[in-house]
Amino acid sequence: MATAGFDRKTVKDVAVAGKRVLVRVDFNVPLDEGRVVDATRIEAALPTINYLAERGASVVLMSHLGRPKGKPNPAMSLRPVAQTLSTLMGGRVRFVPDCIGEASVAATQDLKPGEVALLENVRFHPGDEACDPAMAAELARHGELYVNDAFGAAHRAHASTSGVAAHLPAVAGLLMERELEVLGGLLANPARPFLVILAGAKISDKFAVIESLLGKCDILALGGGMANAFLGAKGYELGNSLVERDRIPDAAKLMEQAAAAGVEVVLPIDRVIAADMTPGVSHRVVPADAIPPDMAAFDIGPATVESIAAAAKRAGAVFWNGPVGVYELPEFAKGTIGVAHAVAAATGHGAVTVAAGGDSLAAVNAAGLADRITHLSTGGGATLELLEGKALPGVECLLPRQ
Ligand code: ADP
Ligand code: MG
């Protein structure tokens, strides 16, 4: 079988010296009172920015942050991000207070080779999300080449992600390339057995991705609130646990599809239960089919962690998305931390391991295991849509590699 092989041009395929290069990055970072709380996404863009700057390009960065809905909103300004980026890069970043208009174009035309500017939030104008061709043309005035490195926004067809490619030659950045190589490789030709661990709050968020991955994986482990629909399909009492009762038939259908495809399904065999989610609440482990009517399951129990760890031990490749419990509370975080350790151990045995999802990565980082997982995917919705087999507009717009 052919490996996926990323089939688009990247920054490595084009001359960049002396050019103004417009780069879409995903700097949609959490802010608290004007300070960047988590710089992971900024750090993830550094290889591409440094690659271009070191080769004598002048680098114009654009991004969205939050949902300002087409109007300027000081609480969602990228100015603090420019500060953090400057610190990370040693003071070379200029902030441009609007992303379009004569003054902003003049500012970026003024950049010298190796210099970097960050434009203000593209979503301060309604034309970005509307993919307005006039907005795309305005943005394109900032460069002679377009580089898309915003994997996390690649599932959106916006002026700043795909529209701008109508006006400039468009290639992938290094982060975009790595995401598509790792995830594409996992889909096209995974080392086997291929274990998929899917959890999180709701089956409705993950139904399409489960259905798609059922055709590709060998073992499917389910946890979190999402697993309740599957346990409900088996007729288990779920007490006050979070469960989408109207999706239980969908869960039953997925179980049938798994059986037909020969996929081994690992469901929770024990759960951590409590009366509610208040911090410090008393909790205990019970078999998965013995949840009292006035209690709810907020985590998987140790026997379930053990069964997922055993599957990870055999796996050649692992994809994990979604915390298996309410990991935000220490009472219900043991399952997720256990899964993170199981995935890290699989990496240690030579498996290719990928973790994806905002909450999942927060749990991996909290457990201190970030450098023991092959790839941490920076895309939330983009990663899931890619795994569902959907085309991503931010990738489709890039030049094909001949
Ligand atoms: P990700 O961001 O990694 O894709 P999701 O957003 O799908 O993950 O799911 C994360 C949320 O699921 C967390 O807020 C967590 O508290 C919740 N969750 C996990 N297990 C349960 C459970 N048993 N009951 C209720 N909520 C749960
Ligand atoms: Mg989430």
Image (cartoon, rainbow, N blue to C red):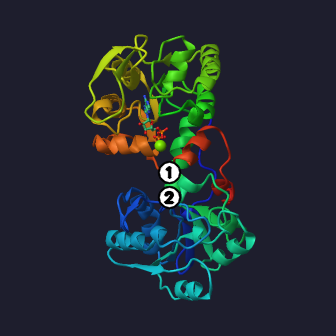
Q: Decide: marks 1, 2 in contact (CB < 8 A)?
A: yes
Decide if residue 375 is on the left or right side of residue 286.
right
In depth, the one of 209 and 246 nearer the eye is 246
* Residue 293: quarter of image: top left
* Residue 376: quarter of image: top left
> Residue 170: which numbered mark, if any?
none
> Picture coordinates of residue 283 (x, y %)?
29, 23
Note whether 390 is above or below 243 in the view shown.
Answer: below
> Picture coordinates of residue 95 (x, y %)?
45, 79
Q: Which residue is mark 1?
A: 178
* Residue 348: quarter of image: top left
- Give the residue drawn at x 62%, y 25%: 247
Q: Amino acid at mark 1?
A: Arg
Find out if the beta carbon at label 1 lies less than 8 Å from the nearest ligand 1 atom: no
> Picture coordinates of residue 394 (x, y %)?
64, 57
In three-dimensional space, the C-alpha distance between marks 1 and 2, rounded to whole angstroms, equals 6 Å
> Residue 174: which numbered mark, if any?
2
Label 2 CA crowd tier, 10 Å (few <14, some 14–19, many 20+)? many
In depth, the one of 401 and 201 nearer the eye is 201
- Kindly state the secondary structure of the residue where label 2 is placed: helix
- Kindly state the secondary structure of the residue where label 1 is placed: helix
Decide if residue 269 is on the left or right side of residue 229.
left
Name the image quarter holding the C terminus: bottom right
In depth, the one of 177 and 200 nearer the eye is 200
